[in-house]
Amino acid sequence: MKEQLYQLLKEVCERFEFAQREEFTASWLAEQCAMSRNAASQYLNEGVEKGEIIKVNTRPVYFFDAAAVFAKCDAQLDKLVYASFKEFNDAMMIDFERLIGYKDSLRHVVEQCKAAITYPPNGLPILLNGPTGTGKSMIASLMADYAVCVGLMKKSDKFIAVNCSEYANNPELLTANLFGYKKGAYTGAEKDNQGLIQLADGGILFLDEVHCLKAECQEKLFQFMDRGVYHMVGDNENWYHSSCRLVFATTESPEDVLLKTLLRRIPIIVKIPSLDERPINEKKALVYSIFKKESTKINCEIAISSLTYQVLMNNSIPGNVGGIKNCIQAACANAFLNHRMNKNVLEIHLYDLPDTILNLLPTINVRLIDQKDDTMIFISRLNEAKPSDSKLIDAFAKILDEYQKYMKNGCSFQELISSSLDAINKYNDYLMFEKRLISNPNYDFTRKIVDKIFSIIMNRYSLKVSNNDILLISRYVYEYSQVKDDIRTWIKEHAPLIASLRELVQQKMPRESAIADEISENIKLNLDIEFDEMTQFRLVLMVRGFADPMKESENTVGVILCHGYSTASSIAEAVNKFLGQYIFDAIDMQLDVSFDKITNQLNDYLKKKQAFEELVLLVDMGSLEEIYKGIKHNTGCNIGIINNVNTKLALEIGSGIMQGKSIESLLEKASQENISSYNYINNRERNKVILSVCATGVGAAEKISDLLATSLPVPIDGEIISYDYQTLVENGLNDRIFDRYNVEFIIGTMNPKVEGIPFIGLEELVMNDDLNRLRELMRNFLTEAQVQIFAQNIIKNFSLDNIVNHLTILNAQKVLEDVQEVVRQLERMLQYSLPAAEKVGLYVHLACLIERLITKNEVQLLESPDEFIANHKEFIEIVKESFSVVNERYSVEIPVAEIIYIYNYIQNS
Ligand SMILES: Nc1ncnc2c1ncn2[C@@H]1O[C@H](COP(=O)(O)OP(=O)(O)OP(=O)(O)O)[C@@H](O)[C@H]1O
């Protein structure tokens, strides 16, 4: 009786969705099995206790067969009794939640998939790209579940997966299967046959291993992607329509294996990380989940030897998630077949692993193996919370130890600083080299904000911070946000000691402490992370590193040269102190010194310097011409000399140097305002460069540089340099970059308007609508044919997400959503659908536009807009209405000049 009841429950579970249906109640089941409701209820509850049946404790109570639930929704539930259906549904994880890592390493992947599937009216084509076994097929099928869940697809709409590699030798068959064929289309085609594109109408067609798709088939696919219609094989007259969404996948690098024409039509390309690139906790969760499923399948506990577990965790198992899953399933099957069961626990040992893995062992250097300690671990233990990261606490503890030593006069302040730096550097090494880099939008966002904060603050104090530093700090901030609670507890325990260390540091390094405070205030403001006092100390040490004399890191050497035993030194000291930075060295000369001796002294000094590009010499008197001639170190470096130096003049020049101004223009201005004359000798050969800029920071500018560099078809005779936008705006042509290089043109998201230097906007480049202009700008680097390839490569390499993510200080995801909303509205109101590639161009343009409007940098009109306003009233209204979401959110209004731009863009598309 009991068995019959269980069997029936299993069958109904396999037949129906798990909803509130009477088939799942004790009364219905009892009636079918001709038993009393009480008995059925008792048996069902026994099943719950044995872990075989799930119970939803509502009125009436519902029961489900646990194995059927696991099989059907590929989920694993941590408990079997639920208070409500909502709780049960949440636990079943209906769509992307089933992906382990969906909140972490796959968070961005999931967001991209959701965006692609929801994009109206029929989603955007999307390409999933990642090594074998990383979950591409699973993600594609979850996209379908998600679409059903949010009401974009009906339950009856199909998800159809086609593996193109299976048709590698018969491309015609794939074409016929995809598009359908008419009777007689080829030998054997005995009747009309609908294609998979038709069958997937309203649903999703998933083309796996799409790189195996032959060119003929791709042609037909383009037609379909562009217009939503296609011809069946054997019928070139009638058009057929399908509104299926397209999802592609490939394990290969898309740029290398897919036709560019296909890539152009896929606006969203998603990179799926390999298992080795994901955080170790995710691997742990995956291993646990796979074992848990096996345990449910065989209905018994599983215990795994610690050695086997180490092998699984510490080695790179080929085939990523799929590979590790196969490996675990094979190990369970081996153990099961060999009846390795101990008190209803299936024991897995190293020798149960498949040979393919065991064969790898000697070559893959298994660490952590202690044969004697091969204890068995119950798999439920694998799910336990991880211990917090204590490495940072170790570093802080080391610093406090040193501080205690300092207090007891056991070491000097300098020694305290240097051992603190050692401890911090050790932690930095751990962060950068040992801890896996988790690339996810949270981290990317943190990095963007940190970049911005440091750009502003470092600019203000004229400190130099390298990209590596930014990367390190971003990692630190990100990791810190994960462990801050543990740190706080530790800090509390050591509060008095830490407070006195802070006092000491503030007293000894007031400037660095103030800058560090400013950094942490901004981090708090923008990232909502409050640093503790030890981290504050860490920042002070870091700022101290940035404050190294500029002359060492910069390419300009400043020297003050005066008669008198300390005239030069006094001026230099006063100016350096005043500017808060070491700008000038001083050479003091005896009053009656000969000219030769002066130049000898100067040359001796220059000999000791590292390579530099520019020398600024401030002298009290003497012939500029003769001093220049006396300098031996003059090959390849520009030399500026000005006389009649005094503190005011040195201060003017020093602060100009700090602001990155051109030395020649500085000297010219100073000579006009003082009774000085100057000489500037240009010895350096100036290389040609392209400058990339972005108002939101150098990080975004570097993304643009990367895009250009990777798109160049041949190496060019010149450099692409990422440069600070604000400095360019402030200095214009007087910026030092123009002394050092021949700047051919500037590319960026906003025009810094440097007189005489052409500018091209990023969106113009990506939209690629004016090849002539690009040709003109690149004329000194590329031939006409090469420019064409360059332009195509830019489109190919451009990733919307990547760039927009660096564009604005605003939340890029939000900006993208708003931009999509604007375009959606525009298309709806204009009753016009933009082609996919053009749409991407418009997205970038609008993202840049929002940034422009916020920073009040809108485009200027060359002609009066009156005629346009008179002739396009309706269009202007439509654009304004489409922009209402942007107007509200960012409190900006779209000006006519921008509307004209959008008009022309849509006209051209
Ligand atoms: N993040 C994940 N969470 C849970 N299971 C996963 C995850 N990623 C992959 N899997 C599981 O790993 C196995 C392999 O995944 P899948 O077949 O989707 O990979 P794939 O990238 O399509 O592989 P291939 O390129 O070889 O076709 C599947 O059983 C899938 O359910």
Image (cartoon, rainbow, N blue to C red):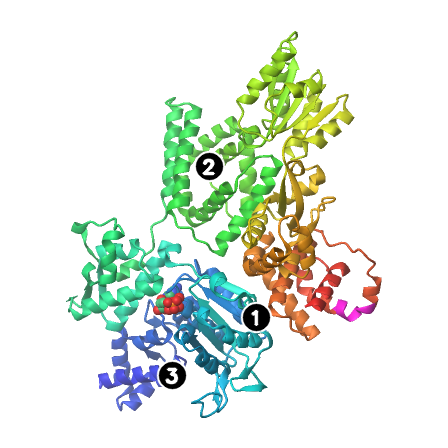
Q: In the rendering, at what x and y percent does residue 434 appear?
A: 37, 46
Rendered position, 394 above or below 291: above
Q: What's the residue type where badge 2 is placed?
A: Arg
- Label placed on residue 16: 3
Query: What's the magenta region?
Result: 871-877
Q: What's the residue type where badge 1 is placed?
A: Tyr
Could you classify mark 2 by the number of other residues whose Cα lies within 10 Å: few (under 14), some (14-19), or many (20 or more)? Answer: some
Q: SS of the residue at dot 3? A: loop
| Residue nearest the viewer, comparing 511 with 451 | 451
Q: In the rendering, at what x and y percent does residue 14 appear?
A: 34, 82
- Label placed on residue 538: 2
Q: Find disc 1 in the rendering and name its residue.
A: 119
Q: Main secondary structure of the magenta part?
A: helix
Q: What's the residue type where badge 3 is placed?
A: Phe
- Identify the residue shown where x is 54% and y is 74%: 219
| Residue nearest the viewer, comparing 604 with 200 | 604
Could you classify mark 3 by the number of other residues whose Cα lies within 10 Å: few (under 14), some (14-19), or many (20 or more)? Answer: few
- Identify the residue shown where x is 84% and y is 67%: 870
Does the rendering let one see residue 155?
A: no
Tag 1 and tag 3, C-beta contact below 8 Å: no
